């Protein structure tokens, strides 16, 4: 199955780790000339600070090509849902949003059905969904990784037409742990992800979909993942909290061929 690569992508996901001020400062440091991000040629950069910090980080990044903002979560309704933030609201400030990050699935009961609603809400609002999948340790040990991934993709993308999207594979056991799947296993899973997308959307229809790896990505291992034929980039949690490390990862991915 042929798959034509587009720009790669690096997503820096700060989760609930930085205040508004810290987020703006980190973005500012990242853009500093010493990290030379203007030389990045074929990699899109997405920063996902907290909802609260989106506006400030957006101001810092204004006018910088290739850097976009994303939200860490999204709600599908509008109106009387106290505390929620809708895709339509987010569309005023950012162009990406996570749908079903494994930490949302784990701590906030995001089911496959809820994730599906989030994906659809993003698409309807013109936001690129970062649709997350990944098996937990138990499923991995039981050899059920592919079963879980097929279920998550088929349910999460039910009723979704092919469109621009990021499918983010993040094995739960690799998040924030320093443990990572070997590149051979990652390539096999990412190829499998493409096969399912092919089944769902038909030949060629998945071209606008970038398949991205996450889980303990660091400057030292980023290129090895980004180089895999079926991997279009990485999402970074812990290491992205340091502008220096995030910049090193961006350059490593950009250079990886
Ligand atoms: P870590 O890089 O800390 O494993 O987190 C990855 C992640 O959750 C990306 O969204």
Image (spheres, grey):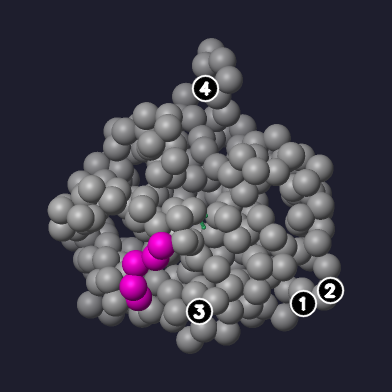
- Magenta residue span: 179-183
Q: CA distance from mark 4 to mark 3?
A: 41 Å
Q: Which mark is residue 33?
A: 2
Instruction: Please indicate, yes or no, whether residue 46 appears anywhere in the rendered image.
Output: no
The N terminus sits in image quarter: bottom left
Q: CA distance from mark 1 to mark 2?
A: 5 Å
Residue drawn at x 35%, y 75% as measured from the top left = 183
**Which is more toward the observer, 26 or 58?**
26
Left or right, 154 with respect to 80, comes to left
Is 149 magenta? The answer is no
**Which circle, 3 or 1, is nearer the viewer?**
3
The earlier-in-sequence mark between 1 and 4 is 1
Q: CA distance from mark 2 to mark 3?
A: 22 Å
Residue drawn at x 29%, y 37% as measured from the top left = 112
Q: CA distance from mark 2 to mark 4?
A: 41 Å
The secondary structure type at the circle numbered 2 is helix
Kindly indicate the quadrant of the structure image that contains residue 231: bottom left
The earlier-in-sequence mark between 4 and 3 is 4
**Which circle, 4 or 3, is nearer the viewer?**
3
Q: Which mark is residue 36?
A: 1
Is 181 magenta? The answer is yes
Question: Looking at the picture, how far across and down is residue 35, in whole percent?
Answer: 77, 74
Question: Looking at the picture, how far across and down is residue 124, in whole percent?
Answer: 46, 39
Q: Identify the residue under disc 3.
A: 223
Residue extending farthest to the right is 33
Residue drawn at x 81%, y 52% as measured from the top left = 25
């Amino acid at each position: 199955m042929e798959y034509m690569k587009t720009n790669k992508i690096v997503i820096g996901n700060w989760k609930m780790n930085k205040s508004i001020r810290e987020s703006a400062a980190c973005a500012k440091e990242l853009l500093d000339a010493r990290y030379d991000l203007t030389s990045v040629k074929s990699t899109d950069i997405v920063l996902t600070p907290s909802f609260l910090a989106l506006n400030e980080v957006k101001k810092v990044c204004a006018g910088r090509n290739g850097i976009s903002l994303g939200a860490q979560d999204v709600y599908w309704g509008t109106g009387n849902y106290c505390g929620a933030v809708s895709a339509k609201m987010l569309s005023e400030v950012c162009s990406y949003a996570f749908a079903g990050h494994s930490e949302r699935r784990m701590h906030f009961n995001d089911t496959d059905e809820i994730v599906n609603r989030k994906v659809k809400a993003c698409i309807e609002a013109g936001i690129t969904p970062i649709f997350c999948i990944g098996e937990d340790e138990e499923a991995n040990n039981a050899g059920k990784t592919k079963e879980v991934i097929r279920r998550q993709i088929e349910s999460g993308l039910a009723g979704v037409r092919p469109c621009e999207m990021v499918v983010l594979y993040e094995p739960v056991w690799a998040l924030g742990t320093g443990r990572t799947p070997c590149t051979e296993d990652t390539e096999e899973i990412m190829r499998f992800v493409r096969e399912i997308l092919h089944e769902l959307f038909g030949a060629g229809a998945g071209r606008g979909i970038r398949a991205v790896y996450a889980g303990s990505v660091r400057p030292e291992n980023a290129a090895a993942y980004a180089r895999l034929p079926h991997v279009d980039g990485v999402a970074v949690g812990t290491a992205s909290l340091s502008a220096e490390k995030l910049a090193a990862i961006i350059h490593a991915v950009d250079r990886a061929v």
